[in-house]
């Protein structure tokens, strides 16, 4: 059972996803296969062993009448040959090594993306928790006001219209509760698919608030690095580009023919013809790259290198263009959230309590309590939305940065009374 806590940061969620998420296994398999290719690229080719039985007599022998022709005419040979790759071993190793780096970086990138997706779902759970706590308090207060209004109506001090208006306001708040519960349930179900086990909500409102505040403050304090190229997806693109360069070198090396050297031994039984009984032979064969000398493969590799390099450059440029805007958005949403949580909401709740006391003392009409409760309900939803918007801005900025330093989360904003 996964129970989120306020102290969870991107590093902790990344570790959790790496251990529990099923989709990471596909990327991890690619990395394992790439590692096997590196080992394969470092191996030398196997030599070839061949055996021959030549000069098998058919028909009359020469000289004629030779006794036991099948024993005295054929020769027997054995040979060992090896092909020496020229200019190809180095590029092949470089290509395989770069592909392994790309696969490892892709695993890291995929894990990070899944961790950010998990954080986004936990943000929905946290904001729904805040919304539920606040609106449920409004529902409880509204039901109490309905009871007071019914007592007034029984004593002919109030009107049925006041009771109906209060009931409508409470019903509106109950709809907000149902909507928040639906959002929370959906987020918990999606969370379970990411972590591979049932997910529960935060243990308390303070835990939910601390989780949101910790992420917002942590990202707001992080220094924007000069080298965005350390981001996992950008490192993967760089490794793919280098692998393509090595692939192009390997393709161009196809123009160099690889000699095949063969060393053999022959035992000849046809001594009647004057052949030597035992002899060695040495031969060299060369392919002639007249038509295909790797030109098509080199062109394809250069195209891959160019595209990977261009994609990486454009991704870096896009990130550098987005980061200032995302930072400004985070700052604005953070200020909005702090204003609602620390100034506006406490004041609105205080006004509501004062209005309810005045209504209880029959100093103000019920319509004032209805209006005050409606205002507080709207502000509670807006406060939760401000947390959600600030948290979303922090997540978007985190996705563009190579790393977000995991520091101790700041103290949560004080809970509104």
Image (cartoon, helix red, strand yellow):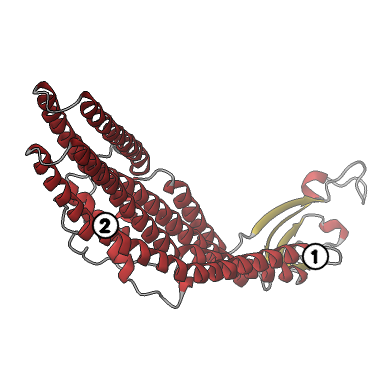
Residue name at image x 37 percent, y 65 percent: 332
Left or right, 286 with reference to 144:
right
In this view, 148 is above or below 195: above
Q: Nearer the viewer, mark 2 or mark 1?
A: 2
Q: Earlier in the sequence, mark 2 or mark 1?
A: 1
* Labelled disc at residue 201: none
The image quarter containing residue 89 is bottom right
Q: Secondary structure at mark 2?
A: helix
Left or right, 98 with reference to 330:
right
Q: Is residue 104 visible?
A: yes
- State the residue in front, 294 or 69: 294
Residue located farthest toward the left when viewing the structure as drawn: 361
Residue name at image x 36 percent, y 50 percent: 120
* Labelled disc at residue 287: 1
Q: Residues within 10 Å of mark 2 (few under 14, many from 20)?
A: many
Q: Is residue 247 visible?
A: no
* Labelled disc at residue 340: 2
Q: Position of residue 274 (x, y in %)?
A: 86, 62
The image quarter containing residue 357 is top left
């Amino acid at each position: 059972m996964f129970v989120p806590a306020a102290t969870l940061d991107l590093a902790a969620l990344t570790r959790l996803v790496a251990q529990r998420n099923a989709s990471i296994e596909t990327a991890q398999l690619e990395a394992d296969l790439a590692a096997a290719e590196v080992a394969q690229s470092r191996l030398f080719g196997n030599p070839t062993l061949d055996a021959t039985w030549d000069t098998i007599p058919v028909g009359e022998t020469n000289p004629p009448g030779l006794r036991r022709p099948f024993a005295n005419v054929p020769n027997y040979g054995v040979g060992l040959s090896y092909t020496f790759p020229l200019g190809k071993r180095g590029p092949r190793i470089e290509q395989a090594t770069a592909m392994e780096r790309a696969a490892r970086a892709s695993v890291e990138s995929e894990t990070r993306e899944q961790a950010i997706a998990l954080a986004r779902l936990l943000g929905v759970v946290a904001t729904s928790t805040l919304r539920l706590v606040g609106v449920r308090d409004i529902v409880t207060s509204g039901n109490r006001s309905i009871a007071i209004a019914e007592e007034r109506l029984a004593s002919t001090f109030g009107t049925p219209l006041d009771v109906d208006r209060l009931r409508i306001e409470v019903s509106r708040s109950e709809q907000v509760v149902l909507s928040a519960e639906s959002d929370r349930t959906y987020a918990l179900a999606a969370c379970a698919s990411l972590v591979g086990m049932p997910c529960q909500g935060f243990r308390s409102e303070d835990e939910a608030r601390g989780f949101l505040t910790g992420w917002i403050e942590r990202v707001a304090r992080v220094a924007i690095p000069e080298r965005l190229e350390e981001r996992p997806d950008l490192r993967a693109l760089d490794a793919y580009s280098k692998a393509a360069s090595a692939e192009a070198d390997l393709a161009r090396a196809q123009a160099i023919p690889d000699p095949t050297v063969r060393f053999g031994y022959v035992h000849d039984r046809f001594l009647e013809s004057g052949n030597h009984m035992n002899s060695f032979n040495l031969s060299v064969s060369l392919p002639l790259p007249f038509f295909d000398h790797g030109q098509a493969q080199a062109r394809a590799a250069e195209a891959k290198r160019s595209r990977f390099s261009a994609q990486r450059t454009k991704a870096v440029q896009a990130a550098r263009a987005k980061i200032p805007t995302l930072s400004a958005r985070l700052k604005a949403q953070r200020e909005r959230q702090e204003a609602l949580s620390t100034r506006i909401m406490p004041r609105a709740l205080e006004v509501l309590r004062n209005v309810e006391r005045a209504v209880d003392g029959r100093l103000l009409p019920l319509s004032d309590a209805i209006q005050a409760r409606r205002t507080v309900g709207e502000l509670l939803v807006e406060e939760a939305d401000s947390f959600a918007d600030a948290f979303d801005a922090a997540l978007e900025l985190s996705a563009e940065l190579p790393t977000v330093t995991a520091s101790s989360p700041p103290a949560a904003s004080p809970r509104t009374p």
